[in-house]
Image (cartoon, rainbow, N blue to C red):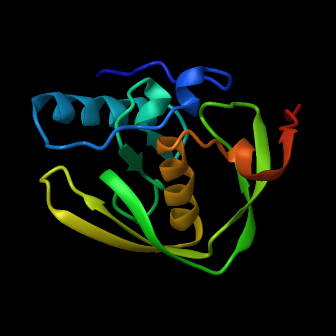
Amino acid sequence: MAVKKILQFGDNILKRSSRRVEKVDEELLKFAKDLKDTLYDGTGIGLAAPQIGVLKKVIFIDLRNETKPILLINPKIIKKIGKEDSVEGCLSYPGYEGIVVRPKKVIVVGKSLNWEDVEYTAEGLLAKAFCHEIDHLSGILYTDRAKKVYKIKEEE
């Protein structure tokens, strides 16, 4: 298992844009496994490559429910429908949450690990996860979009 360190709020890499992936090779396959292992080591539902210090356009989302995990290369939102406030947190900013306006529904395209074109139509939590992780690829954190950010109160 290759669990990587998740970069924390304030790290300059999180504010940089990622590069497009041009092909799937052994290095990318290994990296994809590291991304999955790192997410599964914690409690989050999504992780973007920059969060573990790699400036490549790769995201991994697993809502940990009935939906299948999604690893997406060069993801792009091609359509946004509606808007709603949502509460978001981030593995790179533990202990905090924020109120962010996100689309209710998105259509996302990208490449699979088999280098096949894929398209997802997502609503609710999956739509928010796509928006959050794809923002990471452009150096945008949820705190940049938040109306309000607050510390999570610890339960006694």
Q: Where is residue 122 in the image (x, y as percent from the top left)?
A: 47, 73
Quarter of the picture containing the N terminus is: top left
- Considering depth in this image, is 71 or 12 the residue closer to the camera? 12
Work out whether residue 31 can be spotted. yes
Count the marks: 0
Tell whether 89 sits left or right of 63. Answer: right
- Report the front residue among 116 and 124: 116
Residue at left offset 32%, top offset 51%: 74
Residue 29 sits in which quadrant?
Answer: top left
- State whether residue 50 is above or below residue 127: above
Q: In this view, does 121 lie to the left or right of 149?
A: left
> Which percent across, then down, holds residue 60?
38, 46
Classify residue 12 by image quadrant.
top right
Q: Residue at x 25, y 67 (%)?
A: 118
Answer yes or no: is residue 7 visible. no
Give the residue at x 45% y 32%: 50
